[in-house]
Amino acid sequence: MFLKDRTALVTGSTSGIGLACARALAAEGATVILTGFGNPDDIEKERRALSELSGTEALFIPADVSRPEDNTALVHEITDRLGGADIVIANAGIQHVAPISTFPAEQWDRILAVNLSSPFHLMQAALPLMTAKGWGRFIATASVHSVIASPFKSAYVVAKHGLAGLVKTAALETAGSGITINAISPGYVWTPLVENQIPDTMKTRGMTREQVLSDVLLAAQPSGQFVTVEQIAALALFLCREEAAQITGSNYMMDGGYTAR
Ligand code: NAD
């Protein structure tokens, strides 16, 4: 229970990677703040389970992180109710698959708002208090697309490359203050985000569902396997440890060898 006196905000924690991170943090005693979209009954069930796991009251605070003011309000509410967020995992993310020539402009704006601007606004709101306390962990869920491109994912690739740059810049600005700022970059993880992009990928590439799974997703990873949400959560947890206090400005690939090619 090494996080017993810590509070942890995880955006996009109603599903996939964020939910696994919330569970891992709660299992180490952190008071977890959930946010994201989903069925209210399922979220409440999860919130209660997390409270039991950590022994402290987990919170759910609704927010649409594509809106700058929701990010700020989220951090301010945590500060008012719990004295601040010691750990922030900026994880909410969305994706859209289409060629640049027909990429919907509103999707471009929304993908950049959720995947890139939200972490920026969360940093602006959360870093001053972390600095005052002399301890903080900020982890951004990036992607292999923070270092390599992929056709038909322009907005996502741009947002994740930008996020990697934001993490490095913020790490330099906070180095030595007790705060570390890092990115975790997964390859393919079987979550709703990946599942939901299959129909558009089938259309864009003229493939069957099976071909997308084997020739696009699993073929990209030399391991031939999906990364699991628990594996990503374990890395996030490690970055919260004192042993990781000198790791800042890093961007960890967890991708079955995807980017090693
Ligand atoms: P997911 O779809 O399971 O979860 C996304 C979460 O973000 C959900 O909780 C959703 O409610 C929340 N969310 C989306 N838009 C939001 C908004 N405007 N405001 C508030 N919450 C919002 O997806 P996931 O695969 O768990 O993705 C988590 C992160 O991991 C994302 O940043 C994604 O880009 C990144 N990632 C995923 C993969 C993968 O293969 N699944 C690979 C690399 C990176």
Image: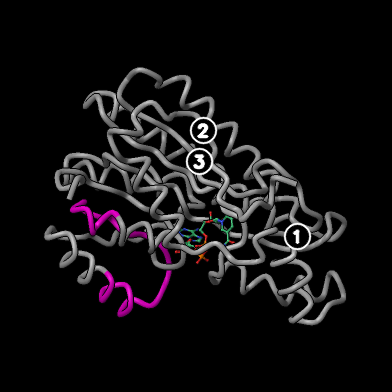
- Which amino acid, by three-letter code, is at mark 3? Ala
- Which amino acid, by three-letter code, is at mark 1? Pro
Cα–Cα span, label 1 and label 3: 28 Å
- Residue 43: name its quadrant: bottom left
Observer-nearest of 228 and 99? 228
Which x, y percent locates residue 237?
A: 34, 48
Observer-nearest of 188 and 14? 188
Which x, y percent locates residue 98?
A: 79, 62
Please state which of the two labelled residues, at mark 1 or mark 3, is closer to the viewer. Answer: 3
Q: Earlier in the sequence, mark 1 or mark 3?
A: 1
**In the picture shown, does residue 27 fall above or below 109?**
below
Q: Earlier in the sequence, mark 1 or mark 2?
A: 1
**Tag 1 near tag 2, CB within 8 Å:** no
Observer-nearest of 90 and 148? 148
Marker disc for residue 206: none
**Tag 2 near tag 3, CB within 8 Å:** yes
Residue located 41% across and 35% down the image: 123
Which x, y percent locates residue 254?
A: 55, 50
- In the rendered image, which residue does mark 2 sit on? 250
Secondary structure type for disc 2: loop
Q: Which residues are magenta?
A: 25-46
- Which amino acid, by three-letter code, is at mark 2? Ser
Residue located 39% across and 57% down the image: 63
Secondary structure type for disc 1: loop
- In the rendered image, which residue does mark 3 sit on? 183
**In the picture shown, does residue 226 fall above or below 75?**
below
- In the rendered image, which residue does mark 1 sit on? 104
- Report if the beta carbon of the residue with label 1 is closer than 8 angstroms to ligand 1: no
Which x, y percent locates residue 135?
A: 26, 29
